[in-house]
């Protein structure tokens, strides 16, 4: 499995990327990748992807954002972590879960960004227990109360959990 940055040529693959089952939050992520992220990559945005030399297997992206706690710090906001539907639950030859490896790559990359505090944060759909567990294994801590956020694909608001962590060093996720 190779980790790399996207090039403009990857936009076409992102427009076809399949990571969703029938759950609304997975469809939301897939729609974001196919529309917004693919267009951004076509225009030069660089996203971290994992590929098997022939096609993209997983991707992740972060960007600078003001800390939602109101501290005034610029932190790294986790925009997306997605794994192709047929590779979800995969274990790498190292024994590490693919999902943990992808999130670890994002955290490592985010912590190297100049001008950002060593904080990573994201919203995760409250119903998305699997992603909440992945974030927990990476050291991201859940806020106790969910926030209601508008979901364009549904046309209504749903509860999301804010997860975040101030890192002093990278803690690799535990292997299975």
Image (cartoon, grey):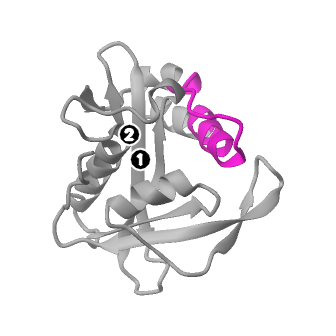
Q: Image quadrant of residue 22? A: top right
Secondary structure under the numbered disc 2 in the rendered image: loop
Number of labelled discs?
2
User: Horizontal and vertical percent for residue 172?
Assistant: 20, 55
Q: Which mark is residue 61?
A: 1
- Horizontal side, residue 3 vs residue 98: left or right: left
**Residue depicted at 33% across the width and 47% down the height:** 100
Dominant SS type (magenta): helix
- Horizontal side, residue 94 vs residue 133: left or right: left
Q: Residues within 10 Å of mark 2 (few under 14, many from 20)?
A: many
Does residue 41 lie above or below 52 as drawn?
below
Q: Image quadrant of residue 92? A: top left
User: Cα distance, mark 2 to mark 1?
Assistant: 5 Å
Q: Which residues are magenta?
A: 14-35
Q: Is residue 20 magenta?
A: yes
Q: Which residue carries the number 2 mark?
A: 47
């Amino acid at each position: 499995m190779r980790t790399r940055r996207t090039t403009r040529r990857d936009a076409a693959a992102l427009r076809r990327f399949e990571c969703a089952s029938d759950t609304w939050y997975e469809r939301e992520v897939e729609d974001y990748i196919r529309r917004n992220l693919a267009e951004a990559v076509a225009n030069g945005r660089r996203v971290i992807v994992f590929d098997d030399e022939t096609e993209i297997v997983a991707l992740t992206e972060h960007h600078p954002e003001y800390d939602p706690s109101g501290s005034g710090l610029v932190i790294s906001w986790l925009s997306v972590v997605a794994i192709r539907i047929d590779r979800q639950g995969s274990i790498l030859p190292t024994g590490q879960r693919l999902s943990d490896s992808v999130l670890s790559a994002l955290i490592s990359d985010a912590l190297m960004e100049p001008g950002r505090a060593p904080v990573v944060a994201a919203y995760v759909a409250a119903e998305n227990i699997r992603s909440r567990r992945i974030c927990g294994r990476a050291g991201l801590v859940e806020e106790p109360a969910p926030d209601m956020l508008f979901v364009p694909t549904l046309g209504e608001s749903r509860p999301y959990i804010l997860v975040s962590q101030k890192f002093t060093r990278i803690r690799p996720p535990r292997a299975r």
